[in-house]
Amino acid sequence: MSGFMSKFMSFSRINGDSKVAPFVVLLLTVTVLASACNLLLPSDSIFYVSTYTITLLGKYLCYAMLALAVDVIWGYCGILSLGHGAFFALGGYAMGMYLMRQIGDRGVYGNPDLPDFMVFLNWSEMPWFWQGMDQFWIAMLMVLLVPGLLAFVFGWLAFRSRVTGVYLSIMTQALTYALLLAFFRNEMGFGGNNGLTDFKDILGFDLQADSTRVSLFIITALLLCGLLILSKKIMQTRFGKVIIAVRDGESRARFIGYKTENYKVWLFVYSAMIAGIAGALYVPQVGIINPGEFSPINSIEMVIWVAVGGRGTLIGAIIGAILVNYAKTKFTAIMPDGWLFALGAMFVLVTLYLPKGLMGLWEQLKEKQQQSKNQSGNDSPNEKAEEGHA
Amino acid sequence: MSILDSTRDAMRRDQVWSFLQEHEQKVDISHQVLLYVEGLNLSFDGFKALNDLNLYINDGELRCLIGANGAGKTTLMDVITGKTQCDSGSVYFGQSINLLDKDEAEIAQLGIGRKFQKPTVFEAHTVMDNLELSLKSNKSVLPTLLAVLNGEEYDRIDEVLETIGLKGERMMLAGSLSHGQKQWLEIGMLLMANPRLLLVDEPVAGMTVQEGERTAELLTSLAGERTVVVEHDMEFVRSIAQTVTVLHQGSVLAEGSMDEIQNNQDVIEVYLGEAP
């Protein structure tokens, strides 16, 4: 056990003065505390955390994972994807299909073979793509493969034709909108307008039980930490350096011999898979997946989370996603119609005054502190040295 | 019959399938010529940027291309390095490698380094990382993901840092270097890959006199390797050149030593005459 721990520690050690390790510890501590306060304390205790809160936190962490995916591609490679909601929703649908098959004959129509919406549509047999989705491992494979494959095909076509910048953003937006329209259709076989819902259990555990909810929350937190560390690691390899090089000078990177389109495609696939995992964790906690998740506005919101937190920092994306969504929960409770205005205002303010997001603000404050320390300590010799130089 | 033939060909046991073979193409310079540019034509919306241009560059020579603005110097480099497609003509590297059907990355991996007019370095990376990225190595995705610097590569980076005089700035971000230092770093990045042919576009543009002199020294010290310089500053060209090629309106006007060029009537008319 200790051997495993030390191996894990050496893997998770991040070079340089990174804040990833302390952040992971903080995130896991909060997760454990919240879970313990839910399961172990009586519900009338002051420190009791309600199951509603746990689910809400789990939802935030899914969004945080999604923001991580956007940050990997936008912050590090400069590809502004406005269609990451598509990968998120596809992952969610794969999980939803598995959960649908788990309902069995407990549906409204009590049909042992077909999900309710197919009975309602008078279908006599299951479409081919629903086959095998009652197996958990196949469903999980699809969670990774479907978004990954879509990202590969899309990326391969777009990056090889050297589509960049605004044009690429518009194309990703069109991609998610096209999928939105497609999934609205009943003939697609994904429940149409209503999507997939009324889930009962996952791997035999009741989805409504506190313990299942807490477990899902903990799994989400663990996966988020794992993906955060993995992404940070990847960005520290030479591959990561090439990715940043592509962001800052794509033609230079080409002229020293890197086929930048391949790098972009694989990073895009990696990012899409993270988004797919986030979607798959989101669906059992929220209890529904419908085509609304594909809507372009969702994908734009994700970009705002990352911008608020600070792009190219990974941690910033996570913090941004959690904070903005917390604000959304609070704000929509008071003034539901005002949220989009608040979101827009936030985006404008962050772009104008905090181009590096909250993480940038933190860095600035730290620098100021250091400067004032330096000045009070030894400003005179420094100045003299400069004078002598001049 | 042809199907039968190709099947037989595919089944031959004394050969490895061509797609499994390593395509490490050797540059064939048995005639001492490294780069053949023949009959190159390129027009942008009717403007002939390159007009039946012929140019041969020998292995190991230091060649200067001069010409007024719009004479086609940078465009020629763009075609050689695969950035721009030409309308007609041929560009061969050695006798056998056709550069026109390769993309930028493949051409770079063949050993043709390109320096831009404006210094382009990766500003968010340190000087060290900039050089690491330019190492001659397998540049496909998976090997790059697993790549770790070994001792030999460290030594190579040190060597290049010494050559370009940026040893003290090793850990500095490239974005915080001065203009001249960025130019040297970019030359250093090209050196890392051990190129056979180095295309340097206006290397002293925007440099101070001292920086320009150091750059001239740097380029002459590389003359054992193969260098081509593009520049329209005559002083600079005089200080380094062996052979000078003058371009005018997309084709070669004259070629020869600096003295010959300066006494050539055509050149004096179109180039030196305008801007002495």
Image (spheres, coloured by chain):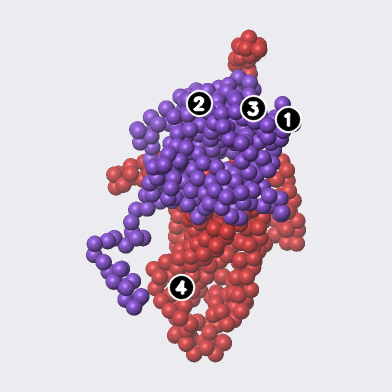
Chain colours: A red, B purple
Q: Residues within 10 Å of mark 1 (few under 14, many from 20)?
A: few
Separation of residues labelled 1 and 3 (CA atoms) = 10 Å
Q: Chain of mark 3?
A: B
Q: Nearer the viewer, mark 2 or mark 4?
A: 2
Is A15 positioned to the left or the right of A172 in the image? Answer: left
Is A261 positioned to the left or the right of B209 in the image? Answer: left
The mark tally for this picture is 4
Residue B103 visible in the snapshot = no
Separation of residues labelled 4 and 1 (CA atoms) = 80 Å
Q: Secondary structure at mark 1?
A: loop
Q: Amino acid at mark 4?
A: Tyr
Same subunit, tags 1 and 3 = yes
Rendered position, A126 above or below B234: below
- Kindly identify which residue carries mark 2: B220
Q: Quadrant of the N terminus of chain B?
A: bottom left
Q: Quadrant of the C terminus of chain B?
A: top right
Rendered position, A135 above or below A164: below
Q: Amino acid at mark 1?
A: Gly
Separation of residues labelled 2 and 4 (CA atoms) = 69 Å
- Kindly identify which residue carries mark 1: B273
Residue B239 lies, in percent from the top left, at: 57, 23
- Kindly identify which residue carries mark 3: B262
x 63%, y 43%: residue: B251
Labels 1 and 3 touching (C-beta < 8 A): no
Separation of residues labelled 2 and 1 (CA atoms) = 28 Å
Rendered position, B29 above or below A73: above
- Kindly identify which residue carries mark 4: A98
